[in-house]
Image (cartoon, rainbow, N blue to C red):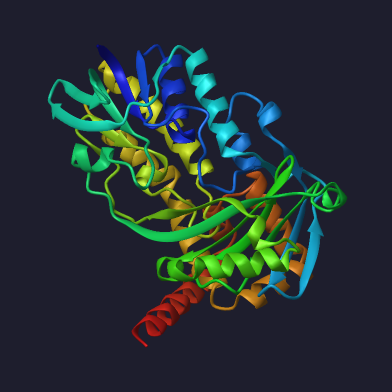
Amino acid sequence: MEYDVIVVGAGPAGSTTARECSLRGLSVLMLDREEFPRDKPCGGGVNVRTAQLLPFELGDVAERTIRELQVSVRAGYSYVRRSDEPLTYMTQRRRLDAYLAEQAIRSGVTFRERAALREVEMDRRGVTVRAGTEGFRARVLVGADGANGKTARLAGIPVERSLGIALEGNIELPPAREARWRERFAVDVGSSPGGYGWLFPKGDHVNIGVGGNWPVGPSLRSRLARLTHYYGFSPDELWGVNGHPLPVFRQGSAVEKENAVLVGDAAGFVDPLTGEGIYSAVKSGQIAARHLAAYVSGAQSDLSGYAHEIERDLVPDLLVSIQLHQIFHLAPPIAAQMVKRSSRTWRLVCALLTGRIGYAGVKERSTVLARAIDLASAAGRVRVRLSTEG
């Protein structure tokens, strides 16, 4: 069968791209190797900045509305800061992704589940895809199948990414403790190199996880157990424990080739500072759809415009996030104290989560601040290099 667009992967990036293309009048096939609803290793936080990108409400899939942040340092000293406005919504990816796929289907997208990608053949007129036991033809191909997906490799798109890693699990939330976590999520800093630990509350359980630089992978289970104890739960009661890579974009990495593009985690668009990827998944999907529609209609001769818009509108935030990550991990306890004691710093955290400012906008506030960030992040890079060499 022939379509204008084939999207491989039905997570937030794939569903967004598929839905936006269909709303622009394109015929769209969305493929996924799993059957929905399916579990997806992820904390499931959708910050307000991301929710504002969506043309519909999250509805029942938003199980908690978060206004409070609990910060602890190395599973010890802690404090809580509160915002008058919502900061993020807690979802289960099993439900969120099924909901987003449903919105795509309602827009006219054809969705094939249990259709694992096997082959990609590209020529000047389009692309042939073999998934499961079937073959499909389209003008363009979208890789939205995450960090472990096959699309980029099969389409010959050279992706350069750095990798972090995370491990998370779930545990039942006793009714007696529900009030504490009703509007609060928690992060623990300083105890995982290059990352942090977290507790994200859901409707009837909490999600606890740890993440960091790739080399910490072998120690994540013990780190997760310690953090679970710290939050007052038993590690023996954790269920659904899963690990997953965190792909971080490297400047200059390809995001398109001929008649194929990459979106979301497949392109490495994870926020380096927080490890969050849903914002960039939705944002890159929306950008991709505009250029795919223009290409299919003949208004654009190629898909290079997608790469240019990503470079202009998404990459600057990712690059500043890398710098802020390097600065934060110079001394996480000091950063934690700044969030506690400085109202200006707390307002900045809230502004980033709610979308009033992007990471790049932080540097645009003043040339002095921009210079300070550049110098501090350079010091962070040197420290990481020296520690690695040592």
**Residue that lies at the very extreme toward the left in this rendered image:** 123
Instruction: From the viewer's perspective, tell me whether residue 251 is left or right of residue 38.
Output: left
**Residue that lies at the very extreme toward the bottom in this rendered image:** 390
Q: Quadrant of the C terminus?
A: bottom left
Judge whether 129 appears above or below 149 on screen: above
Residue drawn at x 43%, y 30% as measured from the top left: 10
In percent of width and height, residue 163 lies at 38, 59
In percent of width and height, residue 37 lies at 53, 29
Can residue 158 be seen in this snapshot? yes
Residue drawn at x 74%, y 41% as measured from the top left: 204
Q: Nearer the viewer, residue 228 or 286?
A: 228
Can residue 368 be seen in this snapshot? no
In percent of width and height, residue 140 lies at 26, 24
Q: Nearer the viewer, residue 3 or 52?
A: 3
Q: Quadrant of the N terminus?
A: top left
Residue drawn at x 45%, y 27% as measured from the top left: 35
**Residue that lies at the very extreme toward the front in this rendered image:** 236
Instruction: From the viewer's perspective, tell me whether residue 189 is left or right of residue 156.
Output: right
In percent of width and height, residue 314 lies at 44, 45
Judge whether 16 appears above or below 221 on screen: above
**Total marks in image:** 0
Quarter of the rendering containing residue 131: top left
Residue drawn at x 52%, y 38% as measured from the top left: 39
Quarter of the rendering containing residue 384: bottom left
